[in-house]
Amino acid sequence: FRKISSATVVGQEVDDLEKDIVLFLIAYRKAFKTIPPKIHFIEDHLLDQVKEFGWYSGLYNEQGGEASHQTFKKKLKNCDHIKSEQERYKTAVEQTTLANILRIKKSEFEHRME
């Protein structure tokens, strides 16, 4: 996946990637009973992102999820002044979502500038 995170993937490369993912998942499912988040990402999201953007930003994997969780915890702490627990969580979720959108857009912009 290092290759697709640093270069634009098009045409036959996308087709080859799709075949490789299918073969990998067949072997993986034979060997293991459970699917961890990283494998779920490969199975259900990686190819969609490559097809849509022509590259993989790295933001939609378990590290991205962990980063979002850390961002959420910081945003929630910054909302301590809000009395209502429901409003506190709602505000933290909204701020985290906005931060994630901005991070994705920044990554897309930086990739296009390369």
Image (cartoon, helix red, strand yellow):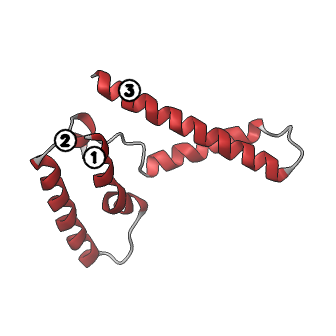
- Which disc number belongs to residue 9? 2
Can residue 71 be seen from the camera position used here?
A: no
Amino acid carrying label 2: it is Val
Q: What residue lies at 38% left-to-right and 63% top-to-bottom?
A: 40
Quarter location, residue 16 = bottom left
| Disc 1 + disc 2, Cβ < 8 Å | yes
Q: CA distance from mark 3 to mark 1?
A: 16 Å
Q: What residue lies at 45% left-to-right and 52% top-to-bottom?
A: 62
**Could you tell which of marks 1 and 2 lies nearer the N-terminus?**
2
**Could you tell which of marks 3 and 1 lies nearer the N-terminus?**
1
Q: CA distance from mark 3 to mark 2?
A: 17 Å
Depicted 51 relative to depicted 109: above or below? below
Quarter location, residue 91 = top right
Q: What residue lies at 41% left-to-right and 50% top-to-bottom?
A: 61
Q: Residues within 10 Å of mark 3 (few under 14, many from 20)?
A: few
Amino acid carrying label 3: it is Phe
- Which disc number belongs to residue 50? 1
Q: 31 or 19: which is nearer to us?
A: 19
Q: Position of residue 105 (x, y in %)?
A: 45, 32
Amino acid carrying label 1: it is Val
